[in-house]
Image (tube, grey):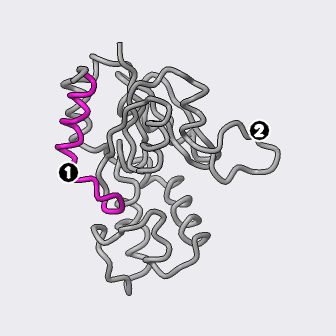
Amino acid sequence: MMTIVWDIDDVLNHLMQDWFEQEWRPAHPECRLSYAEIRENPPHRILGIEESEYLGSLDRFRLSEAARQMTPDARVVEWFAAHGRESRHMALTSRPLEMAGVAAEWVLRHFGAYIRAFGVVPCRSGAGTPHYDEQKSDFLAWWGKADLLVDDNRENIAAAAELGIRGVLFPQPWNGGGSVCDALTDLTGLAHGQ
């Protein structure tokens, strides 16, 4: 049985969009950008702020009730309903360790029928935190069970490919990945060995 590894933020959910529309824009009414205009991730340069200000705002949102109530991407939910039982699934995120628990709870609440494993590559770890992996590909190399990676980051897809793990780029404004429908169609084909 094939094993599919899923990024969480901006793949299973709409974290950046929800943060932008519920947190950033209300606090910055002068911001005239639309979500579709966020062509870089992280978007601090586009927003005209320091990266630390962006990360602080995003981290506050990640711990908020609004983030806990984020709805999963309906198209991904439909894909799981149609194809989820044909593969094994794992979620893999790159978040600060302090925010990984809320992500795990969210994933299991929405996708627990299918996603039974959770991994984290902590970013911005505090002093004293053991540092095992620099990036998702380091985790995947250690874990050794992934057949497919679904992620919104081109670099993660390319690094996984170097390990022999096929990838599906999940479209977002910053990656020019096409349509979600096409990505999920590609995923279905890859999951069925096509």
Q: Position of residue 145 (x, y in %)?
A: 49, 20
Q: Which quadrant is the N terminus positioned in? A: top left
Name the residue located 57 percent from the left edge and 29 percent from the top edge.
141
Q: Eyeballing the image, is 95 above or below 6?
A: below
Q: Which mark is residue 179?
A: 1
Name the residue located 82 percent from the left edge and 44 percent from the top edge.
128
Name the residue located 34 percent from the left edge and 58 percent from the top edge.
175
Label 2 SS: loop
Q: What range is drawn magenta here?
A: 173-191
Q: Position of residue 66 (x, y in %)?
A: 42, 55
For mark 2, what is the residue? 130
CA gap between label 2 and label 1 equals 38 Å
Q: Amino acid at mark 1?
A: Ser
Q: Amino acid at mark 2?
A: Pro
Q: Along the horizontal axis of the image, is 80 left or right of 42?
A: left
Is residue 48 or residue 20 the one in the foreground?
48
